[in-house]
Amino acid sequence: EAGVAQSPRYKIIEKRQSVAFWCNPISGHATLYWYQQILGQGPKLLIQFQNNGVVDDSQLPKDRFSAERLKGVDSTLKIQPAKLEDSAVYLCASSLGLADTQYFGPGTRLTVL
Amino acid sequence: AQSVTQLGSHVSVSEGALVLLRCNYSSSVPPYLFWYVQYPNQGLQLLLKYTSAATLVKGINGFEAEFKKSETSFHLTKPSAHMSDAAEYFCAVTSSNAGNMLTFGGGTRLMVKP
């Protein structure tokens, strides 16, 4: 079966610009996660969706980050405006349900100059 | 609150030698524990998971891990390292009351010398 798809794979922007990332989860997976992985660190959960509803977004910097999953399938994560410290790999993961194994996509590497 | 500590950000072994990557966790309720591997420019791949069944868990690529409640540990081992094992390894924890939200350790980079 197809895995979690993410695009773009790489993005370079200047600070204060906007950027958006796209994720398509494994077919049938109700739960979707966005993680931020800063170089040299483990992934940190930003937001978790169950279908099209938010389960947890306590670690999402809401003044500049937003995410949506309007039809309960694919999702977009947006940063507006970007800061230098947002340089990281943004990983999307999905699972069948809240208690199931998470499968990760290849990630989007963001560089903010 | 839950947390994970991975001792040793870099581990180097010779090909054919034992691999031991250390993970200690903190959780106020019974944990679910995971090991993921990340190859360069790729996402995370699940190696194995502990979800309160057998304490010795076998995973892919010859890896296994043992859950030790008394030591709050979940160390990852492989009897004989292969060059293809060189990668970054992450330990993660969640629990039934954490909504499947994984908390990751800082990772251990495994280097395998020929």
Image (cartoon, grey):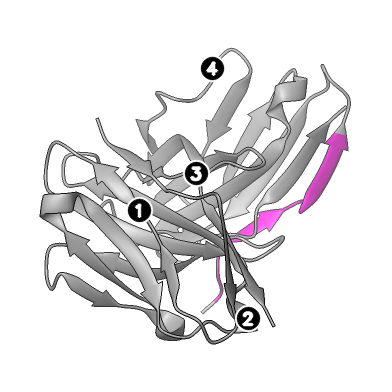
Question: Label 2, on which residue?
Answer: B84
Q: Are marks 2 and 4 on the same chain?
A: no
Mark earlier in primary sequence (1, 3): 1
Q: Between tags 2 and 4, which lies in front?
A: 2
SS under mark 4: loop
Question: Label 4, on which residue?
Answer: A62
Q: Give the range drawn in magenta.
A: A2-12
Amino acid type for the residue under numbered disc 3: Gly
Question: Label 3, on which residue?
Answer: B106
Task: Work out whether residue A100 can be spotted.
Answer: no
Q: Give me the chain letter of mark 2.
A: B
Question: Label 1, on which residue?
Answer: B23
Amino acid type for the residue under numbered disc 2: Ser
Marks 4/1: CA–CA distance? 32 Å
Mark earlier in primary sequence (2, 3): 2
Marks 1/3: CA–CA distance? 10 Å
Q: For the point 47% across and 86% down, which residue is it?
A: B80
Task: Work out whether residue B83 can be spotted.
Answer: yes
Q: Is residue A64 above or below residue B62?
A: above
